[in-house]
Amino acid sequence: MFALAIIFAALTWTGQVRAVATPSATTQPNKQVEDLKERLATRVAELRQTQKKAIAGKVKNVSVSTITVETKTKDIKIELPDEIIVIQYLKGVRTKLSSSDIDTGDTVIVFGDYDATVDILKASVIIIQNTVTARASGTITAIDKTDFTLTVLAADGKSYVIDIETTTKALAWGIQQGIQKGGFSKMTVGNTIHVLGTPVANKDNRISAIRIFDLGNLTAAAGAQAPSASPTPTGGSSPTKSPTPTP
């Protein structure tokens, strides 16, 4: 009888141990699942807040690690990481620059990751695109053969400095020759020119010339083409006639 009591007590104790151990064994996997769900939810939220984005606008402010770009709708702060790529097409050639080359007033296109929570675009690529077309027409008032520039006075009274580049295309017109190939060495003070180019950054009324059409000195040409006036008799008397011979 005493032996049966011991066996019964042992079975009861083992059942209690199993009853205690079973919940702890099932709780651990459940906690891992909940942690995984929480991490996934956090990552999804981060992905929703950060999205690939491209913007275009004009640089308004510049600092060491950020710039502010003015777009059509609002100003956007741009973060400049160390691994950023900055490029610009200079005279038709793709040129790699650095973030320190970005200046106020530059027209840029920015690609990167936009974080809506802090309203910041972390840039990966910035393209400087100063390709706004500028035009000027007027008379050459000065030529600098050292800096390869022309000073042009327009009809509205504004004076423009024209930079002649190695890629500048020039055509010239002459009364006798018509349209032919021109060049910086053929331009002289007094010539009328039409210029198509791009504005030079941070310099008012200065144009980097893409094409120039040189019309020559129109004032001199007009004078050369003006008909000479016939002399007018003075004194009011009629011209003397030759005597008519008599038969």
Image (tube, rainbow, N blue to C red):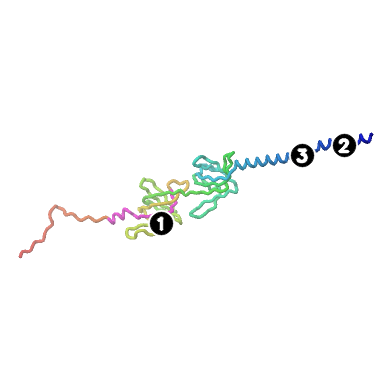
Quadrant of image for the C terminus: bottom left
**Residue 149 horizontal side relative to residue 174, left or right:** right
- Whether residue 175 is visible, yes or no, is yes
The amino acid on which the numbered mark 1 sits, given as a three-letter code, is: Ala
Q: Where is residue 49 in the image (x, y as percent from the top left)?
A: 60, 41
In the rendered view, tell whether residue 35 sits above or below residue 236: above
Please identify the residue farthest to the right as the structure is shown.
Answer: 1
Q: Find numbered disc 3 in the image and state the secondary structure of the residue it sits on.
A: helix
Residue numbers of the magenta segment: 206-225
Q: Is residue 24 left or right of residue 64?
A: right
Q: What is the three-letter code of the residue carrying label 2?
A: Leu
Report how far apart the C-alphas of labels 2 and 3 lie in the structure. Answer: 23 Å
Q: Percent position (x, y) of residue 75?
A: 52, 40
Disc 3: CA contacts within 10 A as few (<14), some (14-19) or many (>=20): few
Which residue position is annotated with label 3?
26
Inspect the image, locate mark 3, and give the three-letter code of the amino acid beneath it.
Thr
